[in-house]
Image: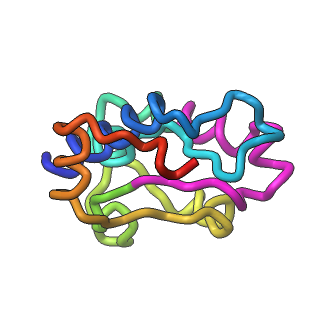
């Protein structure tokens, strides 16, 4: 449950970042807004998960870069284990995800503090 909160918090925070651009030609990194833990662990969201990944891997920008420059946030490490019991099989996606960067952990206390303190991310510009 904690992973779900942090994944969604970080995705929300990134949407508000002053570093965000809507111009793909200016972007260095693409972060698909897929809350992995919530989406993959919920049986009733199987269709949404498939639609999200179909949209991602067929998107012109993803195809142009072959997944490079894409960052996927997935904090629940068992999601990528073969014996994870997930309702959604991941193996068919591996060939598409091989060039993506996968974020599986970070300083959750630091992220939480930054979110709660309204951290000014302009210093990274």
Residue 80 located left or right of residue 66: left
Q: Is residue 62 magenta?
A: yes
Relative height, residue 117 to residue 66 (above, below): above
**Where in the figure is residue 60, as x and y percent of width and height?**
82, 38
In depth, the one of 20 and 98 nearer the eye is 20
Rendered residue at 69%/28% (across/down)? 22
Relative height, residue 125 to residue 50 (above, below): below
Relative height, residue 89 to residue 58 (above, below): below
Rendered residue at 72%/61% (across/down)? 68
**Where in the figure is residue 85, as x and y percent of width and height?**
26, 60
Task: Give the overall secondary structure of the magenta segment.
Answer: helix
* Farthest-out residue, front: 123
Q: Is residue 56 magenta?
A: yes
Colour option used: rainbow
In depth, the one of 11 and 78 nearer the eye is 11
All told, the count of numbered labels is 0
**Where in the figure is residue 55, as x and y percent of width and height?**
66, 33
Rendered residue at 30%/29% (across/down)? 44
Relative height, residue 43 to residue 98 (above, below): above
Quadrant for residue 116, please give it.
Answer: top left
Rendered residue at 71%/57% (across/down)? 67
| Range shown magenta | 50-73
**Where in the figure is residue 24, as x and y percent of width and height?**
77, 37
Residue 5 located left or right of residue 58: left
């Amino acid at each position: 449950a904690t992973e779900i909160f942090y994944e969604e918090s970080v995705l929300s925070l990134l949407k508000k970042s002053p570093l965000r651009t809507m111009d793909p030609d200016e972007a260095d990194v693409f972060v698909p807004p897929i809350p992995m833990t919530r989406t993959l662990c919920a049986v009733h969201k199987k269709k949404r998960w498939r639609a999200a990944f179909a949209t991602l891997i067929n998107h012109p920008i993803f195809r142009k870069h072959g997944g490079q420059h894409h960052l996927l946030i997935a904090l629940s490490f068992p999601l990528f284990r073969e014996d994870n019991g997930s309702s959604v099989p991941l193996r068919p996606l591996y060939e598409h995800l091989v060039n993506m960067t996968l974020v599986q952990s970070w300083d959750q206390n630091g992220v939480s503090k930054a979110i709660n303190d309204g951290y000014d991310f302009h210093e990274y510009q």
